[in-house]
Structures are given as structure tokens and as C-alpha cells.
Amino acid sequence: MNDLSKIVFGVQGLFWGACLIIIVFLIFRQYKKKQSEDFEDRDN
């Protein structure tokens, strides 16, 4: 039973780690997109 719990917690840790990396990547991409945006490129 101990091995099963290690596998479950390992998969859960990988899942949350991947989610955190994706969120940081999306925030960074949005920040870069805002930096390169000119006044004329903005949608109103």
C-alpha cells in the first residue's frame, strides 16, 4: 500500500507542477505581448 500512495502522490505532484509551469508561461507570454503592443494595436 505504501508504494501505491507514492505513485499517486507522484502523479499528483507532476500534475500540479505542470499546471504551475503552464500558468507561469501564459503570464510571461501575456506580459511580453503587452510590452510589444502599440497604441494602434489595441482593441477597443
Image (spheres, rainbow, N blue to C red):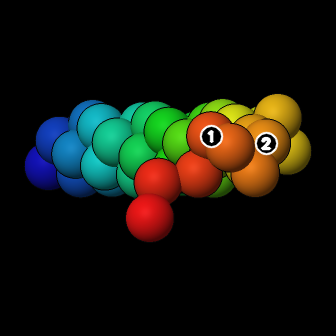
Q: Is residue 11 visible?
A: yes
Residue 11 percent across, percent down from the top left: 30, 38
Callout 1 crowding tier (Cα within 10 Å): few <14, some 14–19, many ≥20: few
User: Do residues under tags 1 and 2 come within 8 Å of each other at their CB atoms?
Assistant: yes
User: Which residue is found at the position 34% from the left and 42% from the top?
Assistant: 15
* Residue for badge 1: 41
* Residue for badge 2: 38
| Badge 2 amino acid | Asp
Q: Is residue 31 visible?
A: no
Residue 24 percent across, percent down from the top left: 64, 48
Q: In the figure, residue 14 lies in which quadrant?
A: top left
Residue 43 percent across, percent down from the top left: 47, 54
Residue 12 percent across, percent down from the top left: 31, 49
Label annotation for residue 12 = none
Q: Dividing the image into 4 quarters, which one contains the C terminus?
A: bottom left
Instruction: Report the side of 36 relative to 5 (left or right).
Output: right
Q: Of helix, strand and loop, which one carries label 2?
A: loop
Q: Residue 43 or 18: which is nearer the viewer?
A: 43
User: Which residue is found at the position 75% from the left and 51% from the top?
Assistant: 39
Callout 2 crowding tier (Cα within 10 Å): few <14, some 14–19, many ≥20: few
